[in-house]
Image (cartoon, rainbow, N blue to C red):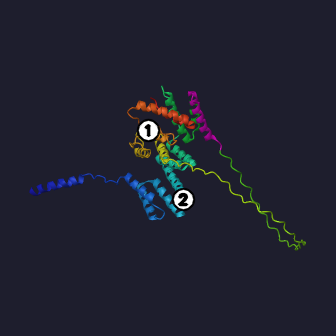
Amino acid sequence: MTPLLYLVPAAVAAYALLGKKKTPQPGTTPDDRVKQLLAVEAAATCGEPQKLAWLLSEYQRLGDNVAVARVRAKQKLCLEGLTDPRKQKLAQLAAALGGASQSCDVRALQLIESEYASLGELRAVAIVRKHIARCSGPSVAPPSPPKGESKAEAIARLTRASAVAMSKGDVATLRAIAAEYRRMGEYDAARYVDGLITRLTAPPPPVAPPPPPTIVLPPSPDVVLPPITPPFVPPVAPPPLPPPLPPILPPVLPPVAPPPPEAPGRDAAMRLVAHLRGRRKGTEDRKRVAAFQRLAGLKDDGLYGPGTATAVGSFGIVPAPVLYWPKSWWKAKKSWNKYVSIQSQKDSPRAAEWLGLRVSV
């Protein structure tokens, strides 16, 4: 019995060591690994093909099909010798769009849409929105107004429905929304929706007819003609040269002032609105909101409130609906509705979008 008594503490210690859970080390989670790979991908150049091949294998191991398509597009660009940064970016976005549209990754498609919008590629933005509409499901008519709905709530509901119908190209839904605006007496908003319908139903520009085919005649047989001797013409003295004209000096143009530089936070504001559009409270990326708040000089708490939305509107962009309100919510909502009304008067083409941001007090 004595040897067994000595073995009992050793067995208990071994069980404790084997049953102890391993705490994950920092930098070993999938999100941290993706961040590390993104940093390496941003620094990789065409002169480092081994690094690109390593990135491709790591993304394949993680199962990130969008990143795999992006790295393969970069390898193809390096082989073709494409050095223009804008063309490289467009090619990478096209490759990422192919992977995201096949897998119906709506979040990736929204990011690609914001990148195309920052580059000013409106046709590509329209194509990505069609993929988002296809992956999000069929369009539906605007829901019937609930009982006891206020006019501000109805305008907000119709604004959201018109944005969804415009992204999906649903003309029937837009016509129903315009009719409901007229029934409410909002004729400016109805005319704005009519303009969206005209933009969707406008016929494509006429295509020029192809040029006529070139008719090639068969060669004629060679005909030898006798040489013709030109008649003798005595030389004529050249006329005297006119006096030289005075030199013509170029006109002096007034100096043209360079265009004002674009605000550095406008791209970040556009990406933030594209991320928050249609999201509910608690589903947003607070890190992205905090990054924009630091850029705008606000408190980086990651909460998308009226102050952050006002900062987005200062860049000439219609912000997304406010998700969080301070403790003095009544006063904050009243100030917010006043700000939205002023912006709708200043920005009349987008007055319906501004008025759709009003909240009930």
Closer to us: 266 or 270: 266
| Residue in view at x 51 percent, y 39 percent | 318
Q: Which mark is residue 307?
A: 1
- In the rendered view, tell whether residue 45 sits above or below residue 312: below
Is label 1 or label 2 in front? 1
Q: Does residue 198 appear to the left or right of 210 in the view shown?
A: left
Could you say whether the residue bearing mark 2 is in a helix, strand or loop?
loop
Crowdedness of circle 2 by 10 Å Cα count: few (<14), some, many (20+)?
A: few
What is the magenta segment's predominant secondary structure? helix
Q: Is residue 185 magenta?
A: yes
Classify residue 3 by image quadrant. bottom left
> What is the secondary structure assignment of the residue under circle 1?
helix
Q: Amino acid at mark 2?
A: Asp
Vertical position of residue 96 compared to residue 179: above or below: below
Quadrant, the C terminus: top left
In the image, residue 147 above or below residue 168: above
- Amino acid type of the residue that numbered disc 1 sits on in the rendered structure: Gly
Q: Quadrant of the N terminus?
A: bottom left
- Work out whether residue 239 or residue 120 is closer to the camera in this orientation and state it: 239
How many neighbours does mark 1 have within 10 angstroms: few (below 14), some (14-19), or many (20 or more)?
some
Q: Is residue 358 visible?
A: no
- Of callouts 1 and 2, which one flags the residue occurring earlier in the amino acid sequence? 2
Residue 64 position in % (x across, y down): 44, 53
- Measuring 71% from the left and 54% from the top, which residue is drawn there? 210
Q: Separation of disc 1 and disc 2 at Cα?
A: 39 Å
Q: Which residues are magenta?
A: 181-203
* The disc label shown at residue 84, or none: 2
Residue 140 place in picture, x, y as percent: 53, 36
Q: Which mark is residue 35?
A: none
